[in-house]
Image (tube, helix red, strand yellow):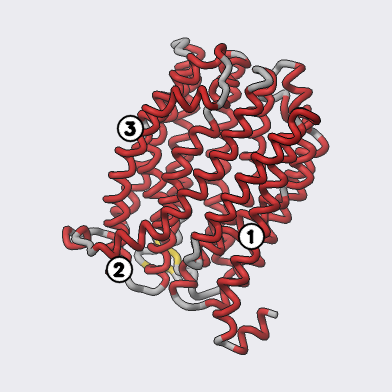
Amino acid sequence: MENANRKTTDFTTGNPLSHIMRFFWPLLLTSTLQQIYNFVDMYIVGRGLGDNAFASVGNMGSLFFLIVGFSLGLSNGFGVLIAQSFGAKKYDDMRHRIAGTIELAALMSVVLTIASELFLPFALKLLNTDAVLMKNCLIHGYIIFGGLTASISYNISSSILRALGDSKTPLVAIFVSSVTNLILDYCFIFIFKTGVEGAAIATVLSQIISTIVCVIRLRQIEIVRLSRSDFKNERSIYTDLFRNGLPMAFMNSITAIGCMVVQHFINRYGVDYTTAYSACCKYLNLFMNPAATAGNAMSAYTSQNYGARKFDRIKDGLRICLSISFVTYIILGSLMTFFPELLIRLLIKGDASVSLACEFMPICGIFIIAVDCLFVVRNGVQGMGDPVLPMWSGVIEMILRITAISLLIGSIGFKAAAIAEVCAWSGALLVNIYAFRRRLHPRFKRRPSVVKNFR
């Protein structure tokens, strides 16, 4: 059912497959554009400034995810509660939650910007960043973290839109900002010869544009137009938002810490290892993207139906989103397994780095199905209002990742980074499968007819 001038989608009625696919495709295009932009951005940096600049920007990936991932987790956690209110048709409650989200996002922007700017030099030393790369890492990092408000604003506004079933507006926002970003990248690096700071400035400016597009759309949706009274929230509103958002934020940050430790071990072996790992991570992020998108669709769909107490529809969403993950695994996992060198040479030139990356890619290509399923199941758990077990799965993910890299890198070299990823994905998936069954099964036990169908 469509309402509010067809700018929102109600997932609680109608055909689940039709709803999910209509929501999924714009969301996939959005996230694919983001990944393609990141890929082309790194391509421009590598081709325009060389492998060392490529490694410098890539070295910032895990640190950037630590900070931005925390804000993204909060945004997604807040969005789950907004979607549940929307699904339950409690629009007054929904507006109070949106107002509280905006206030908390403003506070979060100030705190994270200050913390990240102060923490940056220390963090780069913890990562064992090579002296050759340190200057570029600092330049790029200070600019990116200085523009965190733009990134957080986009995450919050797009999260609210997805909670309301609107996946098309974030697509428009990312399309416009990505085109702008790539044009600015080219101009700054090849015409103005600015170095890595040009790529960072282009990123911040494009995030501002994407935020503006989302905010304009939100102002057009009648049921989310806020008044002063919506900002007069009781303490319980903020408590609920933090109770759901903080575990999801900590889960992302814990995962990022595990990745930073892997980066620490990788960087100890020199620039060739750092360059290879940066290229492999770009492909992992790109090829995980369809399953991650299916997970986001699962989150919005599950949140609305959970809020509406329509538990029998949730299993349909799980089956559909897992099917999407399996199809994309067959295609993209095969590319990583059988054509690693062809893929890697699109990003980097050095033979030593390419050879290392070709050890990593096939291993992850075979086992990437674990993380594909993880995205769907974990988002389903979070959509049902349980952020705590997914957070603990992040702890297990971190422990397995750190244990594998520390024990294996000395004996098998760069392959240890791939095995660390596979171990982390598998452990987290098992925890979230248990959490999903635990969260959903008691609901079905109250409805015998549904239990029969579920089984």
Q: Is residue 318 left or right of residue 99?
A: right
Residue at the image point whose x is 36% and y is 73% from the top: 89
Q: Which residue is mark 2?
A: 93
Q: Determine the secondary structure under disc 3.
A: helix
Residue at the image point whose x is 32% and y is 47% from the top: 105
Q: Determine the secondary structure under disc 1.
A: helix
**Which of 184 and 42 lies nearest the eye of the viewer?**
42
Percent coordinates x, y for residue 343 in the rendering: 73, 30
Location of residue 209 by image quarter: top left
Percent coordinates x, y for residue 11 in the rendering: 49, 69
Q: Which residue is mark 3?
A: 114
Question: In the rendered image of this protein, does residue 209 appear above or below residue 183?
Answer: below
| Residue located farthest toward the bottom when viewing the structure as drawn | 448
Q: Which residue is mark 1?
A: 431
Question: In the rendered image of this protein, does residue 389 appear above or below residue 34?
Answer: below
Query: Is any part of residue 184 visible from this angle?
Result: no
Q: Disc 3 and disc 2: Cα gap in Å?
A: 32 Å
Mark 3, residues whose alpha carbon is within 10 Å: few (<14), some, or many (≥20)? few
Confirm or deny contact between disc 1 and disc 3 (CB under 8 A).
no
